[in-house]
């Protein structure tokens, strides 16, 4: 007669990679009304981080770059009449230590939904 044995050794399962991309979205309401947006606009945390200036004391530079990116998104939405599209956003970063401007280029994507407009890096979508 054969005996049945129960093995109770457990192995740790590897972490499961999510198939869903989790993106944090931030309200961009401070600048959207004056640009002509009629819907709520949110920007990705990654875009906000990518627009951060080289030196932490230049917060006005971040606001200006964000304003410019929002302006371009609104401009394209108005002209193209498409619910989503991608575009390249080029701007200069002021490196006050070296005394130079550094050219920066970001590939952005904008999507217009029923009551919401999302603007972020292309990887956020």
Image (cartoon, rainbow, N blue to C red):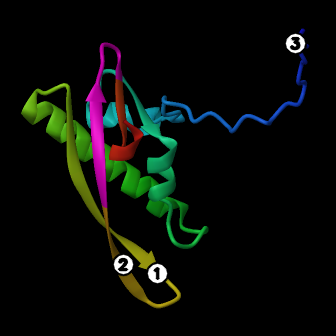
Q: Is residue 76 left or right of residue 32?
A: left
Q: Main structural element of the magenta stretch: helix, strand or loop?
A: strand
On-image quarter of the C terminus: top left
* Residue underneath mark 1: 95
Q: Give the label on residue 102, or none.
A: 2
Q: Are marks 2 and 1 in contact (CB under 8 Å)?
A: yes
Crowding at dot 2, Cα within 10 Å, few <14 / some 14-19 / many 20+, comes out as few
* Residue underneath mark 3: 2
Residue 123 is situated, as x and y percent measured from the top left of the image, at 38, 45
Residue 16 is situated, as x and y percent measured from the top left of the image, at 62, 33
> What is the quadrant of residue 100 in the picture?
bottom left
The range drawn in magenta is: 106-116
Compare marks 2 and 3 and give the one earlier in the sequence: 3
Compare marks 1 and 3 and give the one earlier in the sequence: 3
Residue at mark 1 to residue at mark 3: CA–CA distance: 77 Å
Residue 96 is situated, as x and y percent measured from the top left of the image, at 50, 83
Q: Identify whether 69 is placed above or below 33.
A: below
Number of marks in picture: 3
Q: Secondary structure at mark 3?
A: loop
């Amino acid at each position: 007669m054969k005996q049945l044995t129960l093995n109770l050794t457990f192995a740790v399962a590897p972490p499961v990679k999510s198939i869903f991309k989790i993106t944090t979205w931030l309200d961009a309401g401070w600048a959207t009304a004056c640009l002509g947006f009629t819907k709520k606009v949110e920007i990705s945390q990654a875009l906000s981080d990518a627009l951060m200036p080289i030196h932490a004391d230049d917060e006005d530079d971040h606001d200006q770059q964000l304003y410019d990116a929002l302006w371009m998104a609104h401009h394209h939405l108005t002209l193209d009449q498409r619910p989503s599209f991608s575009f390249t956003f080029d701007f200069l970063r002021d490196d006050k230590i070296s005394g130079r401007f550094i050219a920066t280029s970001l590939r952005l994507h904008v999507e217009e939904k029923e009551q919401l407009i999302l603007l972020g890096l292309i990887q956020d979508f």
